[in-house]
């Protein structure tokens, strides 16, 4: 028990006990999704939370202690949930303002179908790098790109893969991103060294993805008359129902300018909502109540074009509630796993079997991936392995920049590839992939988000062959001692943890 009588700390569970809530939850998820064919992971995750709580009580925790762990993780992640709410507002209001229709119109008239996927990835990467938020990029520019892709008759999972590749890579290397700052913070490095050290995986994976999207564009898409007729029908319908003008891009420009000036993302996005509302009233004839309705319930229009109806009838805060509820339950499950020390016990068991840099780098990356799969929380998948593995890297005299790259790739980049993760749930909801309606082919966006999984694979390859794996410099080791960082004893394949001053703690 801790010194604070109001809070208890669970005893470390055995590996078998720690695995019980993980295995049972994954089994229930599997039955729900694959046996019943119903992609609604909410209740299986809630059951998993209850199982974890029972394990915590067996370990000596009270419900109050478990609840504290649950709400701590939810509290830490509330800024991202707030971004999700704002994105719902933006989608509804920017459609009403003509911003999204204008982006779709210009995209269909200026881009060619063959280069669209590659252009979509690059555009999302640039915007995400500027904004520092993959979620904001997916919900705004990504939405418009989904409309353009539909106009080109490109399967929506291909477009979603390109959007996710660009958006999450821009986020990964943006100094304005929360996860890009979290990874070096928990491993004791600085953000710009962290970004520089990610270049050996970031640049090749983006180039590989770019080539794949170009090849797919030129081999998958034909310049037939039917496609051009469809594009003409969509652009004509947009012109008939909206004022189309470059001035209508003002809401998007406002958000980008504020982000460049390093304004926080939440007020920047809300400024985009207000600007979009003003534009909708001035140029599209919307009333105040109309704008409020669009922000809350989404935009609604019925035209002669089914394509336009399916593209633009969306948005609003309420459209995000399925996703938000899933995220909150997943975060609560992750918080319970952390509070009961189940994740810590699993990671400790892994570390006890690893005695080389290759092994520890592989373990750190895969631990972040597994935490994303099990806990559904991208922040926990970065913070927990970062805290647990950092002393081992120091003991091996390898720079913790290796660790920050491993957890960034296994955390940030894998997050959108797990449908019940906070990142994956957001992508599915914001891009309208409608997985819940049984359209499981839309899950093909996961393997088609090439940049997101190629980068961790390259990192694992580098670790095995010993390239781009910096050793700790003398200055870095001196800084560890000065700051009293925990360092694991590493000798003859054995590891034990001690502080930099030499005091043993395990």
Image (cartoon, rainbow, N blue to C red):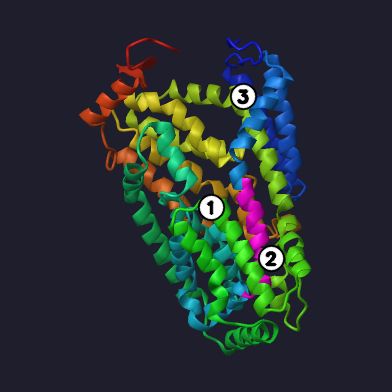
Q: Position of residue 7 (x, y in %)?
A: 64, 16
Q: Secondary structure at mark 1?
A: helix
Foreground pick, 446 / 31: 446
Give me the residue at 56% from left, 40% from top.
Answer: 372
Q: Earlier in the sequence, mark 2 or mark 3?
A: 2
Residue 29: quadrant of the picture = top right
Measured in 3D between alpha carbons, the distance from the residue under mark 3 to the one under mark 1, in whole angstroms, is 29 Å
Mark 2 vs mark 1, foreground winner is 1
Q: Are marks 2 and 3 in contact (CB under 8 Å)?
A: no
Q: Position of residue 363 (x, y in %)?
A: 44, 32
Disc 1: CA contacts within 10 A as few (<14), some (14-19) or many (>=20): many
The answer to whether 392 is drawn above or below residue 106 in the figure is: above
Q: Which residue is mark 2?
A: 92
Q: Which residue is mark 3?
A: 339
Give the residues drawn in magenta, as a range: 81-98
Q: In the drawing, does residue 230 fall left or right of residue 41?
A: left
Measured in 3D between alpha carbons, the distance from the residue under mark 2 to the one under mark 1, in whole angstroms, is 18 Å
Q: Which residue is mark 1?
A: 265
The answer to whether 496 is drawn above or below residue 470 in the figure is: above
Give me the residue at 46% from left, 52% from top.
Answer: 171
Measured in 3D between alpha carbons, the distance from the residue under mark 2 to the one under mark 3, in whole angstroms, is 38 Å
Q: Earlier in the sequence, mark 3 or mark 1?
A: 1
């Amino acid at each position: 028990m801790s010194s604070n009588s109001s809070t208890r700390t669970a005893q470390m569970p055995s590996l078998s006990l720690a695995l019980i809530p993980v295995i049972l939850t994954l089994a229930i998820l599997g039955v729900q999704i694959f046996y019943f064919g119903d992609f609604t992971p909410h209740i299986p995750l809630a059951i998993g939370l209850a199982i974890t709580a029972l394990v915590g009580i067996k370990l000596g925790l009270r419900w109050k202690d478990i609840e504290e762990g649950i709400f701590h993780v939810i509290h830490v992640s509330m800024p991202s949930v707030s971004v999700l709410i704002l994105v719902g507002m933006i989608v509804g209001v920017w459609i009403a303002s003509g911003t999204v229709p204008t982006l779709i119109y210009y995209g269909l008239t200026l881009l060619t179908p063959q280069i669209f996927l590659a252009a979509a990835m690059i555009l999302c990467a640039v915007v995400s790098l500027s904004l520092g938020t993959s979620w904001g990029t997916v919900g705004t520019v990504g939405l418009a790109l989904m409309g353009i892709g539909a106009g080109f008759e490109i399967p929506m999972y291909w477009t979603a893969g390109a959007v996710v590749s660009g958006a999450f890579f821009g986020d990964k290397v943006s100094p304005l991103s929360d996860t890009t700052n979290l990874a070096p913070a928990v491993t004791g490095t600085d953000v710009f060294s962290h970004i520089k050290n990610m270049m050996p995986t970031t640049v090749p994976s983006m180039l590989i993805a770019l080539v794949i999207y170009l090849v797919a564009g030129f081999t998958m898409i034909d310049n037939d008359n039917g496609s051009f007729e469809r594009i003409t029908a969509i652009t004509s319908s947009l012109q008939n129902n909206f004022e189309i003008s470059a001035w209508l891009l003002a809401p998007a420009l406002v958000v980008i300018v504020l982000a460049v000036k390093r304004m926080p993302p939440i007020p920047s996005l809300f400024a985009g909502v207000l600007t979009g509302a003003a534009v909708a009233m001035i140029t599209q004839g919307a009333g105040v109540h109309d704008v409020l309705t669009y922000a809350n319930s989404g935009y609604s229009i019925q035209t002669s074009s089914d394509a336009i109806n399916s593209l633009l009838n969306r948005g609003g805060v309420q459209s995000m509630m399925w996703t938000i509820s899933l995220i909150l339950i997943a975060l609560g499950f992750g918080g319970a796993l952390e509070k009961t020390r189940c994740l810590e016990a699993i990671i400790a068991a892994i570390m006890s079997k690893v005695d080389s840099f290759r092994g520890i780098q592989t373990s750190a990356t895969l631990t972040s991936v597994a935490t994303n799969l099990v806990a559904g929380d991208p922040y926990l998948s970065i913070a927990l392995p970062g805290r647990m593995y950092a002393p081992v890297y120091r003991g091996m005299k390898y720079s913790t920049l290796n660790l920050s790259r491993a957890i960034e790739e296994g955390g940030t980049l894998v997050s959108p590839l797990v449908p019940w993760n906070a990142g994956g749930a957001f992508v599915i909801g914001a891009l309208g992939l409608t997985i819940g309606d049984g359209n499981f082919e839309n899950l093909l966006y996961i393997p088609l988000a090439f940049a997101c999984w190629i980068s961790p694979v390259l990192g694992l390859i580098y670790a095995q062959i010993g390239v781009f794996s910096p050793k700790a410099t003398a200055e870095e080791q001196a800084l560890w001692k000065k700051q009293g960082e925990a360092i694991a004893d590493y000798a003859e394949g054995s590891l034990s943890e001690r502080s930099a001053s030499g005091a043993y703690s395990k």
